[in-house]
Image (spheres, helix red, strand yellow):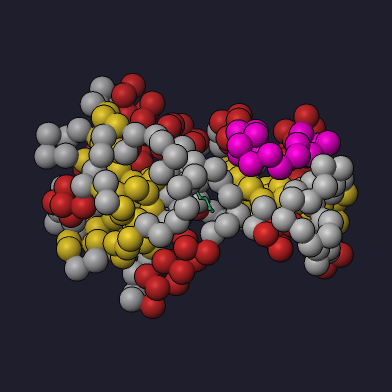
Amino acid sequence: GELFLNGRYLPPEQATVSAFDRGFLFGEGIYEVWLVVGRRLVDLDSHLSRLDRSLRETGIPVPPERAALPTILAEIITRNAITDGFIYLQITSGAGERNFTGEASTRPTLLILAQEKDALAAPALQSGIAVDLVPDIRWLRRDIKTIMLLPQVMAKKAAMAHGRQDAIFYDSTGVTEGASANVFIVTAQGDVVTRALSHELLPGCTRNRVMILAREAGLTVREETITVDALLAAPEVFLTSATSLVMPVVRIGDSTIGNGQRGATTQRLQQLYLNYID
Ligand code: PDD
């Protein structure tokens, strides 16, 4: 396969980045992940809009390839013969001397990778997952999709060490989001609830799509604070992301959610989402 780095398609072993790259030195970078189903990028435009927003909010320069990105993404899928999988795209503010502010003329570093994987076949989509519930120690601009992922890496590694598959974050106001996904609950009345957008969480593209599909199906969707108590008492909990789709959560810490199995509304939303992407 080949990846795309700064204007060129390269075999992975030939792709190198400067030790002075500001992504490496300062974490000054942003990224996107697309789900690929049947060689097609799911929600191409909403991820591109979020990418543009992340660049704008951080001041990371727009790479010269921006207008050609849809073409380059399609080319990466072709060159790697991806049928079902993921595309990872990262932009950092490029390489320069090691100083905090950098130079305006620096060319941003653009990296695009492809990964073949049939996410729709994951057994966890049926069985659900167990997660840790941990304090959200991240910064206060979580709406920006930054590569500064140390808190997420720490939370996921700790969860794995506890025999769990993922983590959900909470702060003093309630549940924020998952370590790499948005959080939804289904209430006893069958309403679908997720936290309203703010600087405290990422505006997930899958979150948005699932909300649209749920409303089209006649479900009531509310954007509201979810307290930790409400999370643990919810009949159904699920996560949404490009990599986990609509993922049932059946255990949180030591609490069992519902009867410990994927709930009916979660299953319905999974089906609606699968119909949408397939
Ligand atoms: N993560 N919240 C966080 C903190 C995330 O990292 C992600 C995605 C989401 C869901 O966003 P979307 O539905 O647009 O994928 C929410 C990606 C998949 C990752 O880091 O690999």
Residue sitting nearer the eye, 40 or 134: 134
Number of callouts in the render? Answer: 0
Residue closest to the far bottom: 161
What residue is at 43 percent from the left and 49 percent from the top? 181
Q: Could you tell me residue 52's position as x and y percent?
A: 65, 33
Q: Quadrant of residue 169?
A: bottom left
Q: Quadrant of residue 193?
A: top left
| Left or right relative to 198: residue 172 | left
Q: Quadrant of the N terminus?
A: bottom right
Residue sitting nearer the eye, 11 or 19: 19
Specify whether residue 94 is in view: yes
Q: Could you tell me residue 234's position as x and y percent?
A: 17, 48
Q: Could you tell me residue 229's position as x and y percent?
A: 15, 52
Q: Is residue 177 above or below residue 155?
A: above
Q: Is residue 49 above or below residue 236?
A: above
What residue is at 37 percent from the left and 49 percent from the top? 177
Q: Could you tell me residue 84's position as x and y percent?
A: 59, 48
Q: Magenta part of the protein: which range?
A: 51-66
What residue is at 27 percent from the left and 51 percent from the top? 172
| Left or right relative to 19: residue 267 | left
Residue sitting nearer the eye, 1 or 222: 222
| Left or right relative to 230: residue 87 | right
What residue is at 71 percent from the left and 63 percent from the top? 25
Q: Is residue 140 above or below residue 69?
A: below
Residue 250 is inside the magenta segment: no
Specify whether residue 125 is in view: no
